[in-house]
């Protein structure tokens, strides 16, 4: 820092100016998304661990997926719609549908706490039975929510500091 007649100038600010010029164009996204990914790992692990034994083969479909767009967003859940799960009879099923059915139930056993976008259709409206809801995805989220928040708080500051150090060294 150098002083000249009522004027203060900072030396070595070129890197800071460049960082703040680049910052609004998505610079914030990289460190925040890195912290989100680290925070999502315990949620993903809890979802995989809470799957019923008969659906353990579909655990590969539970993923952490970054959303595209301006805002830093991330999803954790069943995202592998292209992958097929083969049951013991050799029949192929979409793992998203299997996990959805076992989580929220089917037919007369549909979960009353979940708001479905479509009601039951007329042909099956009187049918009894169905898959009972396990609500294991919701239970996994509730059990790992606090841990995810703690991991995010621990890593967000580290990732932002790392981001600034990488930019400042240029």
Image: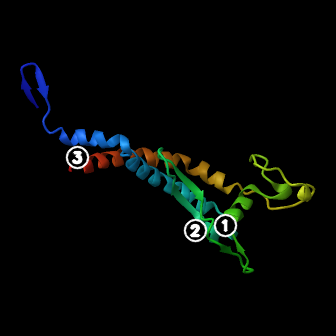
Total labels: the figure holds: 3
Question: Mark 3 or 2, which is nearer the eye?
Answer: 3
Q: Which residue is mark 2?
A: 60
User: Is disc 2 surrounded by few (<14), some (14 to 19) or many (20+) residues within 10 Å?
Assistant: some
User: Is disc 3 surrounded by few (<14), some (14 to 19) or many (20+) residues within 10 Å?
Assistant: some
Residue closest to the eye, 141 or 91: 91
CB atoms of marks 1 and 2 within 8 Å: yes
Q: Can residue 155 be seen by looking at this rendering?
A: no
Residue closest to the eye, 70 or 11: 70
Q: In the figure, residue 59 lies in which quadrant? A: bottom right
Furthest residue to the top?
Answer: 6
> Residue sitting at 67 percent across and 63 percent down?
96
Kindly report the distance in space between the C-alpha atoms of the residues bearing marks 1 and 2.
9 Å
For this view, does 134 lie left or right of residue 63?
right
Q: In the figure, residue 49 lies in which quadrant? A: bottom right
Q: Can you give x and y, in whole percent of width and height, for residue 15 in the image?
A: 21, 43
Q: Is residue 2 above or below residue 155?
A: above
Task: Give the structural element (helix, strand or loop) at label 2.
Answer: helix
> Residue sitting at 75 percent across and 48 percent down?
117
Q: Residue 168: which numbered mark, if any?
A: 3
Q: Residue 95: which numbered mark, if any?
A: 1
Q: Can you give x and y, in whole percent of width and height, for residue 81 in the image?
A: 63, 65
For this view, does 30 lie left or right of residue 78?
left
Q: In terms of sequence position, does the residue under pointer 1 or pointer 2 come before the other?
A: 2
For this view, does 143 lie left or right of residue 99?
left
Q: Residue 43: which numbered mark, if any?
A: none
Q: Can you give x and y, in whole percent of width and height, for residue 37 in the image?
A: 46, 54
Kindly report the distance in space between the C-alpha atoms of the residues bearing marks 3 and 1.
46 Å
């Amino acid at each position: 820092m150098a002083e000249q007649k009522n004027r203060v100038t900072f030396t070595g600010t070129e890197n800071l100016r460049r960082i703040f010029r680049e910052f609004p164009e998505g610079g914030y996204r990289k460190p925040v998304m890195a912290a989100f990914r680290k925070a999502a790992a315990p949620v993903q692990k809890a979802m995989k661990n809470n799957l019923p034994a008969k659906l353990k083969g579909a655990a590969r479909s539970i993923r952490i997926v970054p959303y595209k767009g301006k805002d830093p967003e991330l999803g954790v859940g069943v995202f592998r719609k292209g992958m097929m799960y083969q049951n013991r009879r050799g029949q192929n099923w979409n793992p998203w549908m299997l996990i959805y059915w076992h989580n929220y139930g089917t037919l007369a056993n549909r979960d009353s706490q979940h708001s479905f976008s479509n009601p039951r259709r007329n042909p099956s409206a009187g049918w009894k039975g169905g898959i009972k809801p396990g609500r294991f995805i919701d239970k996994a989220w509730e059990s790992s929510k606090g841990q995810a928040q703690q991991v995010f708080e621990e890593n967000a500051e580290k990732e932002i500091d790392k981001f600034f150090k990488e930019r400042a060294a240029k």
